[in-house]
Amino acid sequence: MDVTFAGDGSATIVPTSEEAAALGEEFGELLTWFATTLTALSYLRTGDTDEFDRKTWAHMLATAERHLGGRLDGIRDALIRAHATVGGTYGEVAKAMAVARSTAQYRRDRVTASAPSEWERWAVSGARSGGA
């Protein structure tokens, strides 16, 4: 995926044809959810939120939690499992996650000792059972 940032603050994301095919229609949804979350982050950082009401904050929270939270957890767990499958070490996981080796060991062992979660299955196949 090619990501280009312009001096005016704009960004362009261009997936390869293989990446676009693998992500399908979700590519646009994911970009929209990330954009909403980045917008929320920018407003939180600037404090320029006078015009925001409860519904605006609730929408941004729902986007971050319902649409991105589980997906990011699933992606992380799928990456941990893939790394373990090819013989990755606890030390490599610790470095990648910027945590102590004991924490990395605990996290990897927790992931690899159980079946993939719904969101991990989504990360690998794009399929999931249920809504949002």
Image (cartoon, helix red, strand yellow):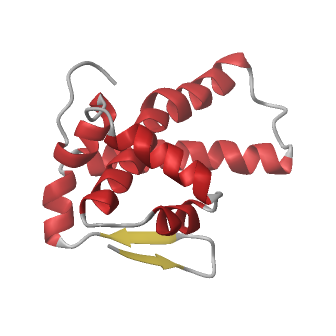
Q: Which residue shows up at 25% across the image and 66% down it?
A: 86
Query: Left or right: where does residue 45 sit relative to residue 64?
Result: right
**From the viewer's perspective, is residue 53 above or below residue 29?**
above
In the image, residue 108 above or below residue 119: below
Instruction: Compare residues 84 and 70 and report the one nearer the observer.
Output: 84
Which of 116/73 is in front?
116
Pinpoint residue 54: horizontal percent, then vertical percent: 71, 17
Quadrant of the image occupied by residue 97: bottom right
Viewer-proximal residue, 52 or 77? Answer: 77
Q: Where is residue 83 in the image (x, y as percent from the top left)?
A: 33, 62
Quadrant where the C terminus sits is top left
Residue at x-position 50% and y-position 70%: 11
Residue 15 in the image: state x and y as whole percent.
Answer: 27, 69
| Residue appearing at x 66%, y 42% in the figure | 40
Q: Can residue 71 be seen in this view?
A: no
Q: In terms of depth relative to the viewer, which is nearer, 89 or 15? A: 89
Quarter of the image that includes the N terminus: bottom left
At 42% across and 44% down in the image, what residue appears? 109
Q: Is residue 46 visible?
A: yes
Using the image, determine if residue 76 lies above or below residue 117: below
Count of numbered tags = 0
Residue 23 at x, y percent in the picture: 22, 53
